[in-house]
Amino acid sequence: MRASEHPNNAPGVPMLFPPWIENLQVKYLNKVMRPLARVMPGMATVKHRGRRSGKPYETIVTAYRTGDTVAVALGHGKTDWVKNVLAAGEAELRIGRRDLRLVNPRIVPVGGDATGLPRMARLQVGRMAIFVADVA
């Protein structure tokens, strides 16, 4: 399956990585990265609940923060964790030893207005969508 045909590929939120990379990451790399996410700069864990099941999940992401704004580049498109957080309207984000409550989640589409976002997110918005949330 090509990335353009993948369910994560949504209007304004393109999937840049091929599906085989996502499968590799989910199956193997996330298990290795989970313990490292607590100590590696920029790595964070999004704690969210399933939209239908209510089951708790943890997803490793690269988060950028400026003041009370957190941004995550969506190179894998509109994945399940993004859909779950948007549906719930909130999530927990663990950066290092700090737990942050995220509210007002939204997506800045490719080429959208990146004013006020962290520098790395502003650099990436030309190629990929950005997940943005406020710290409560």
Image (cartoon, grey):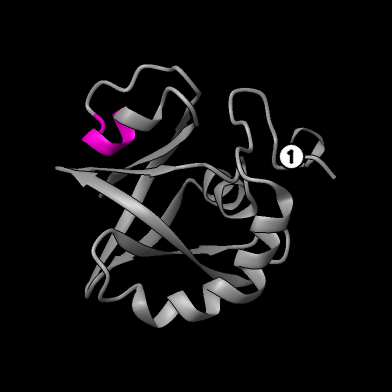
Tell me which residue sits at (43%, 17%) in the image.
112
Tell me which residue sits at (53%, 42%) in the image.
75
Residue 133, x across and y down, in percent: 36, 42
| Residue type, label 1 | Ala
- 31 or 105, which is in the foreground? 31
On the question of residue 51 being in view, the answer is no
In terms of image quadrants, where is residue 31?
A: bottom right
Q: Is residue 119 part of the magenta span, yes or no?
A: yes
Tell me which residue sits at (36%, 46%) in the image.
103
Residue 85, x across and y down, in percent: 52, 50
Quarter in which the N terminus is drawn: top right
Q: Is residue 33 part of the magenta span, yes or no?
A: no
31 sits left or right of 72 in the view: right
Residue that badge 1 annotates: 3
- 42 or 85, which is in the foreground? 42
Secondary element type, mark 1: helix
Bounds of the magenta segment = 117-122
In terms of image quadrants, where is residue 33?
A: bottom left
- 109 or 20, which is in the foreground? 20
On the question of residue 4 being in view, the answer is yes
In terms of image quadrants, where is residue 24?
A: bottom right
How many residues crowd around disc 1 within 10 Å: few (fewer than 14), some, or many (20 or more)?
Answer: some
In the figure, 26 relative to 61: above or below? below
Extreme-left residue of the structure:
67
16 sits left or right of 114 in the view: right
Tell me which residue sits at (28%, 58%) in the image.
42
129 sits left or right of 100 in the view: right
Residue 92, x across and y down, in percent: 38, 62
Residue 100, x across and y down, in percent: 27, 60
